[in-house]
Amino acid sequence: AYPALPDFKHCVDATQPDNIDKTGIGINCCPPPVDRSRIKDFVPCVTTVNTRKPAYLFDVSSDYYKKYTSAIQKMKNLSPSDPRNFRQQANIHCANCDGGYYLVGSPELYDVHYSWLFFPWHRWYLYFFEKICQNLIDDDTFTLPFWNWDAPEGMQIPSIYNSGLTSPLYDCFRNSEHLPPTVIDLEWFYGKKPEDPKIQIENNLSTMYRQMITQSKTPTDFFGKAYRAGDDPPTIGDAGQIELTPHNDVHVWTGISEPPNAIDLGALYSSARDPMFYAHHSNVDRLWTIWVNKLGGSNFTDPDWLFTKFIFYNEEAKPVRVSIKDGLDITKLGYKYEDVPIPWLDDSA
Ligand code: C2O
């Protein structure tokens, strides 16, 4: 077999609602086309390692908030023909997740969800998003925050994302019943009734323990099933434990998820239009590092996974090709996560 690769020459309409057999409404979310002859292979060359911090540490009067909002505002102000433009960055997610490309060598559509592509694709996606932020504010120490929803301090929408309609970090398509101080439900589904906040926090901690430890014994449990060239598109039953819960639940809890009008964080195709998406995924990425570094989990060693390649745009708006194997050690990508307490792990003894 061969690694899965999308056909970047031809981007087609994605579909909403999210269905890979394309019976929904067509949505054009193709990012600016890529000239295949200009795609360069990329391996990061790192001199300093920056620390991604939990979003709850910052408020609107912090210097960090100023930097972060200035980066996102600049991204929003770029021309729509620039792939670094905020909406085009969201389109990259849409096209890779909702059938914007065909799988090379296959009549099937490509999808980075519900399989072993999920963790590494999103890691690289955030990597370039962060680089673009750094470049726009001319500060190569800038990092994205992580939304630490697995610890009580982080179990609500972080205040920096909820600081008024004019903030570049605000998004109007969020569930109005879930604004702060509502405690997040890591196993939420549309229509589920709220729980007492204290009980909810306990429930969330047991969800984390179960998904990270009890249910994630093997790489396939944790990451999701293999997905290679020529395979049928992955379905939800092929997804890894963390992708299913809490990752999906955080999406639908935060965004508008009422069918059939789900939008922004509540629907795959539009998720990355909410700046909070990147903090949510930063935490998902952090859980990968915890699973490997603290829980003894191991990455796949299958070459079809290691040599899977993705294409993104770098901070100079140039197309680059990266492989999973070069993204396994985040310090080689120039970042790490602040070592915050992990109550679902440390207090569980
Ligand atoms: Cu690409 Cu949280 O999904």
Image (cartoon, rainbow, N blue to C red):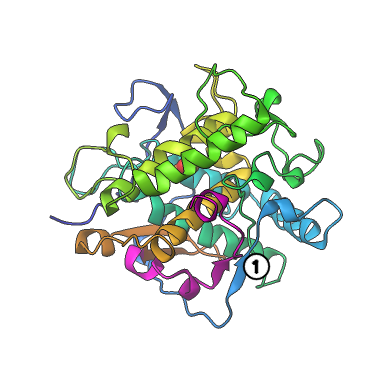
| Numbered circles on residues, count | 1
Residue closest to the far front: 349
Q: Position of residue 19 (x, y in %)?
A: 36, 27
Q: Nearer the viewer, residue 199 or 229?
A: 199
The secondary element bearing badge 1 is classed as helix
Q: Nearer the viewer, residue 294 or 129?
A: 294
Residue at x 87% of width, y 54% of height = 61
Looking at the figure, which quarter contains the N terminus? bottom left
Outermost right residue: 61
Residue 116 located left or right of residue 342: left
Q: Horizontal placement of 206 versus 213: left or right?
A: right
Residue 147: x and y, percent? Answer: 62, 49
Q: Is residue 125 above or below residue 137?
A: above
Q: Quadrant of residue 165?
A: top right
What kind of residue is marked 1?
Asn
Let me know if residue 80 appears in the view: no
Q: Is residue 23 visible?
A: yes
* Range of magenta residues: 323-349
Residue beneath the point at 74% across and 34% down: 180
Image position, residue 218 (x, y; %): 27, 52
Q: Quadrant of residue 141?
A: bottom right
Q: Nearer the viewer, residue 256 or 297?
A: 297
Say above or below: 94 vs 337: above
Asked whether residue 296 is drawn in magenta, I would say no
- Which residue lies under the disc numbered 1? 135
